[in-house]
Image: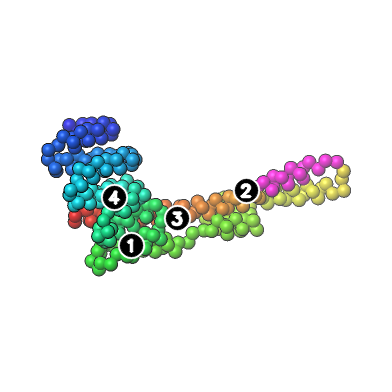
Amino acid sequence: MLERIEDPYLLFLESLRSYTTSTSPVDAWSHADRALQLCIRQGKFETARNFVNALYRDYRADSLVVHKLLLRLVDLNLQYNNGEEAEAYITRLPEYLRTEDATKFRLSHSYVLMNRPREALTTLLSIQSDVYPKTTEFAQIRQVLEGSAASSHRSAVAAMAMSALVPGSGQIYSGHLFDGANAFMFCGILGSASYMGWKYQEGRSGWQVIPIITSIAFLYYYVSNIWNAGESAERYNNYQDSMLFKRMISDYVAIEKKIIDRQ
């Protein structure tokens, strides 16, 4: 019957009802898991937390079930790229579980989702076991994280300083050649027009409209060029971070699937 319900909210309500009326512990757990997965998939984190508190009360006498529930919530949040929620549930685990290698690996994954590569690398390197996890993916993740921790990010300050000296050079430094060429060309044209306008007006009386207009336009584009250089550096850094994220995430998921299968 549940498989025929397409609306996520109705499916969530029916899962809750099935959980409360189920007489089989296995079926009850299945319905609870479905309800939690729906909450997290739809981004209803507050609803998920409230339901978790209810499950805590139902299973408070069985610590193993509670710990299994928390680990399942961590895995669900990692599956849907909710790093902050995953970290929050990890902190609710008892100390002996938080220090396990599998939990450390999950915590490292949550740091990556929150774009905190240095903390992810530190957590990953704290794994002591020689046998966990000896996989190609683990080596790849570590390699990418080590590269990220010492990544060649572009400095926004350096890019702005370069474009202040030579318009467009900061954009080129950040990998945006077209923007750099445009900035150099427009600043060069407007700067030359402004200079020629003032030279033309030398010794002449009356309003110097043309040189004033060209000077204002030049200053506007010159300042915009400096500001854009800083934004170019930020865009470059964000792109590099996203590429690192894409390279790592599939490897994290592959290893976590092995963790879950072992459990």
Q: Are marks 1 and 4 in contact (CB under 8 Å)?
A: no
- Nearer-the-camera pick, 229 or 63: 63
Along the polypeptide, which appears first: circle 4 or circle 3?
Answer: 4
Nearer-N-terminus badge (2/4) = 4
* Tag nearer the camera, 4 or 3: 4
The tag earlier along the polypeptide, 2 or 3, is 2
Quadrant where the image shows the C terminus: bottom left
Report the residue marked by disc 3: 240
Helix, strand or loop under label 3:
helix
Closer to the camera, 90 or 115?
A: 90
Q: Amino acid at mark 2?
A: Ser
Residue that mark 1 sits on: 124
**Is residue 213 shown in magenta?**
yes
As helix, strand or loop, the secondary structure at mark 4 comes to helix
What residue is shown with label 2?
224
Residue displayed at 28% across by 61% down? 99
Q: Nearer the viewer, mark 2 or mark 4?
A: 4
Residue 132 percent coordinates (x, y): 24, 64
- Residue at point 67%, 46% (across, down): 220
Provide the residue designation for mark 4: 74
**Going by the picture, which residue comes out furthest to the bottom?**
130
Q: Secondary structure at mark 2?
A: helix
